[in-house]
Image (cartoon, helix red, strand yellow):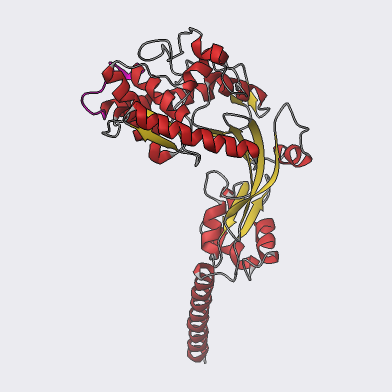
Amino acid sequence: MWRSLASNMLTFLVVGLFLLGGVILWGKSQYTASGPLETAICLRVERGSNMTKVSRDLEEQGAVTNGAMFRIGAKYSEKTGLLKAGSFLVDAGSSMEEIVAQVTTAGASSCGTEIVYRVGITRIFAEVRELDPASNKFVERAEFQPGVDETPAVYTEKRSEADTRYRIALAEGVTSWQVVEALKAMDVLDGDPGERPAEGMLAPDSYEVVPGSKRADILAEMQERQQLRINAAWEARTDGLPLANPEEMLILASIIEKETGVPTERRQVASVFTNRLNRGMRLQTDPTVIYGVTKGEGVLGRGLRQSELRKVTPWNTYVIEGLPPTPIANPGMASLQAAVDPDTTDYVFFVADGTGGHAFAETLEQHNRNVVKWRAIEAERQNN
């Protein structure tokens, strides 16, 4: 009898172990299999939350079918205590394993709200936007000029949320004064910016910041990036340029940046100035005259007067020889590259062509014809 009982118990034990193994294998397959989510979602994990709360949110949004399995998988993989606060983009079909990995990996939020402070040539504004998980595109919630417009309620709301991300976007061609003044107006930043950086020495780029970031530290990062770009561009320069050093390259790049917003034109514009410098011709470029008037502190906001074109300033290339003494803006990498690798042309003139670009000419006669065309376009626009 004892033998029979022992045999039966052994049989039950084997069957039980077999069933347990089957359950574990089934659970693992459920944990790693593609999930039921049909459209991507943005999962927000509050500071101080836990896996139970996260699993319930996922169930409610249709990302998992079994919250208990999600929690068991997280515990089995020893990730329960690694939960991070933030907003996470959960793609359609994400498995429980993939979602656990997302919410327990250190790093920036991958969706949710982003506040972008855009520093442009004509204006500075803050943009509150949120990532739409379905389209993976940002949707604007609000836009305003700090210190000028009334602060939108959504901006105040999102500023108080811990997982909101912040970014400063610096446009090509802005001046150092504009950048410093913009940083002063950003309430997400702290500290005095210190001495204004030299013109041309701030890299137009995108900069991630966090609440409390120091203004001086951000300016230092901008200068560091620009110096790296200057070094790289100068190292890659072509032979025969009328530029003695990286400083002259930076000055020319800033003029190119202010003369054209058309990427495909940069090297053509660079060729005009290179040819003029090589021939001993004055550069005769309006942006340098404007800088002599404004010193980079704001936008002129009107056309140049004849008296300003004739007035002697260190930057007025209608009256001085060669390059001005300093850059007139902060050029981007493309303009730096154009300055040291211009197109090979005989162009020495250019004028607006009415399309946003320019008409280039090798002779004064050709240039005068282009000017007549441009004046006709201007007149037509004024009449309309």
On the question of residue 195 being in view, the answer is no
Pick the front one: 287 or 190: 287
- The percent coordinates of residue 312 (x first, y second) are 48, 7
User: Number of numbered discs present?
Assistant: 0
Vertical relation: 34 (above or below) 298 = below
Name the dominant secondary structure of the magenta segment: loop
Pick the front one: 176 or 195: 176
- The percent coordinates of residue 121 (x first, y second) are 57, 29
- Dividing the picture into quarters, in which one does residue 302 lie? top right
Find out whether residue 298 is within the magenta segment.
no
Vertical relation: 42 (above or below) 211 = below
On the question of residue 357 being in view, the answer is yes
Residue found at x 29% / y 15%:
280
Vertical relation: 346 (above or below) 46 = above
- Dividing the picture into quarters, in which one does residue 332 lie? top left
- The percent coordinates of residue 190 (x first, y second) are 64, 22
Vertical relation: 307 (above or below) 139 = above
Residue found at x 49% / y 28%:
173
- The percent coordinates of residue 146 (x first, y second) are 70, 29
Q: Is residue 334 left or right of residue 344?
A: right
Pick the front one: 106 or 171: 171
Pick the front one: 369 or 204: 369
Residue found at x 43% / y 24%:
255
Furthest residue in direction left, as rendered: 239
- Dividing the picture into quarters, in which one does residue 236 lie? top left
- Magenta-drawn segment: 236-247
Instruction: Quarter of the image for the C terminus: give it.
Output: top right
Find out whether residue 246 is within the magenta segment.
yes
